[in-house]
């Protein structure tokens, strides 16, 4: 029987989970410092909730769940696994609007699913780490989101990341200037979003495949080639998007994002629900980004019937973990161990006392494992060492008579005898 997980999905062994929990812990701590609250939503959504929110390419990647019984056998679907965390958030805001604060700030760390072709670095199931602010059109929201993302990455040890910044209204202006009709804007943005990944020649070919004329494609790419982002922004300063970008840049000079932002008018962000500022976080010598997002002022209105301003950013947990692993960025203190102390069992008669000692140490705030069998002490030491457990607790006849515990440090070989009530404090105070 094949024991591998389904294609595009993974098992996480204990060491993997510890690293993931470490990164998620940093993310949650930073977001909470910025006043964001936690939220969780179901893995499955009604299919109509998701369809039509991501554009043609996104809709094709939605994992559909067949109806149960005879209707399922006919290939009909009424549910789907969530594609991202943004559309479920929009649904939640519409459903609970009256119970939520005027400015609702939430973070969410949960898995999402894409019916994509698995390849290196691309999975069908992966986690997203989203932070969103609902209810305000102020550019303070963008500055706070970008500041929070910068604080997260700095805490994790990233030093040279950059934020690419653009605005959908500027892109619309550029597309119009290039001669593209409105019905070609969405498909052109999907292709343009790949400019930094596949280059202008490949984007020109894809634009042509998507029905954009050769002259329009050449004009569009020429606009980005002919002028720097700042020059192009100055040229179209009357555009509302240009004014909003300038405001974001000014506010970010007072935040952790100061000095990290690059205007990039070729940045498109392929999802169709973006309406204003858009951004991606990139690291030199890394294909793809560590995160991205933008403003989506119309999405919640699809559910609520009235527009509610919203803006968010999603950090790519999987990519962050890969990069941190490849570049040895995890703290050395993040040792793959499940316990601080392992309690040994000399003989079967002492099993009950071993369980009792483990309980005393756990009550004192120490992580404790118990060797489950009476075995040679050398084998027990070897097992504890293989698990990177630092201390081994031994209670022989002499220690039991004195009410003490022999505590051996496997890293140094040192051994001390302590009163049972002192062991937990000794372990916790050890460097």
Image: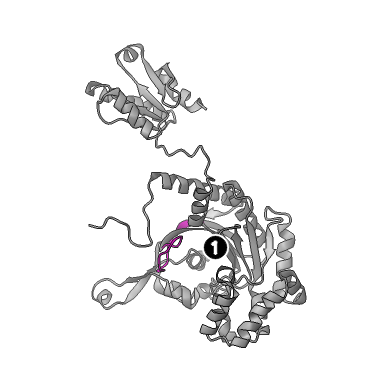
Which of 153/67 is in front?
Answer: 153
Corner quadrant of residue 140: bottom right
Instruction: Report whether residue 105 is seen.
Output: yes
Which of 165/146 is in front?
Answer: 165
Q: Is residue 340 above or below residue 317?
A: above
Q: Residue at x 37, y 18 (%)?
A: 405
Q: Position of residue 87 (x, y in %)?
A: 49, 68
Callout 1: 10 Å neighbours few (<14), some, many (20+)?
some
Does the magenta-highlighted stretch encompass residue 53? no
User: Which residue position holds label 1?
Assistant: 288
Q: Position of residue 81 (x, y in %)?
A: 39, 66
Q: Position of residue 299 (x, y in %)?
A: 54, 72
In the picture, measured across the screen, residue 115 lies left or right of residue 179, that is: left
Corner quadrant of residue 290: bottom right
Q: Is residue 25 above or below residue 41?
A: above
In the picture, measured across the screen, residue 12 lies left or right of residue 140, that is: left
Q: Residue furthest front?
A: 201
In the picture, measured across the screen, residue 346 lies left or right of residue 406, that is: left
Does the magenta-highlighted stretch encompass residue 114? yes
Boundaries of the magenta span: 108-123
Quadrant the N terminus occupies: bottom left
Q: Position of residue 387 (x, y in %)?
A: 37, 35
Q: Residue at x 60, y 48 (%)?
A: 33
Q: Residue at x 38, y 31 (%)?
A: 385
Numbered disc 1: secondary structure: loop
Which of 99/404 is in front?
Answer: 404
Q: Is residue 107 above or below residue 240?
A: above
């Amino acid at each position: 029987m094949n024991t591998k997980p389904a294609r595009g999905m993974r098992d996480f062994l204990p060491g993997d989970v510890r690293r993931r929990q470490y990164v998620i812990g940093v993310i949650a701590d930073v977001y909470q410092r910025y006043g964001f609250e936690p939220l969780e939503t179901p893995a499955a959504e009604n299919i109509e909730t998701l369809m039509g929110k991501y554009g043609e390419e996104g809709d094709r990647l939605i994992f559909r769940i067949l109806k149960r019984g005879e209707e399922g056998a006919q290939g009909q679907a009424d549910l789907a696994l969530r594609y991202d965390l943004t559309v479920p958030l929009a649904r939640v805001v519409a459903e609970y609007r009256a119970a939520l604060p005027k400015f609702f700030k939430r973070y969410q760390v949960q898995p999402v699913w894409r019916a994509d072709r698995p390849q290196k670095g691309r999975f069908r199931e992966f986690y997203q780490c989203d932070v969103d602010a609902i209810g305000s059109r102020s550019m303070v929201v963008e500055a706070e989101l970008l500041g929070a993302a910068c604080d997260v990455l700095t805490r994790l040890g990233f030093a040279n990341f950059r934020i690419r910044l653009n605005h959908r209204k500027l892109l619309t202006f550029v597309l119009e200037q290039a001669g593209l009709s409105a019905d070609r804007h969405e498909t052109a943005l999907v292709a343009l979003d790949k400019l930094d990944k596949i280059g202008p020649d490949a984007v020109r070919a894809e634009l042509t495949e998507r029905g954009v004329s050769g002259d329009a494609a050449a004009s569009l790419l020429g606009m980005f080639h002919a002028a720097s982002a700042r020059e192009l922004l100055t040229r179209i300063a009357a555009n509302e998007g240009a004014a909003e970008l300038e405001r974001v840049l000014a506010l970010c000079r007072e935040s952790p994002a100061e000095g990290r932002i690059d205007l990039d008018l070729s940045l498109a962000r392929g999802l169709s629900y973006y309406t204003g500022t858009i951004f991606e976080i990139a690291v030199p010598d890394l294909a793809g980004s560590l995160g991205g997002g933008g403003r989506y002022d119309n999405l919640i209105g699809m559910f609520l019937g009235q527009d509610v301003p919203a803006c968010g950013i999603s950090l790519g947990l999987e990519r962050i973990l890969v990069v941190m692993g490849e570049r040895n960025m995890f703290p050395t203190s993040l040792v793959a161990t499940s316990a601080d102390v392992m309690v040994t069992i000399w003989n079967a008669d002492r099993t009950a006392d071993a369980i009792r000692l483990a309980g005393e140490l756990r009550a004192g705030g120490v992580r404790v494992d118990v060797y489950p069998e009476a075995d040679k002490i050398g084998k027990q030491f070897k097992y504890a060492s293989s698990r990177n457990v630092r201390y081994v607790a031994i209670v022989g006849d002499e220690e039991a008579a004195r009410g003490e515990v022999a505590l051996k440090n496997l890293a140094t070989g040192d051994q001390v005898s302590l009163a049972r009530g002192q062991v937990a404090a000794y372990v916790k105070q050890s460097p």
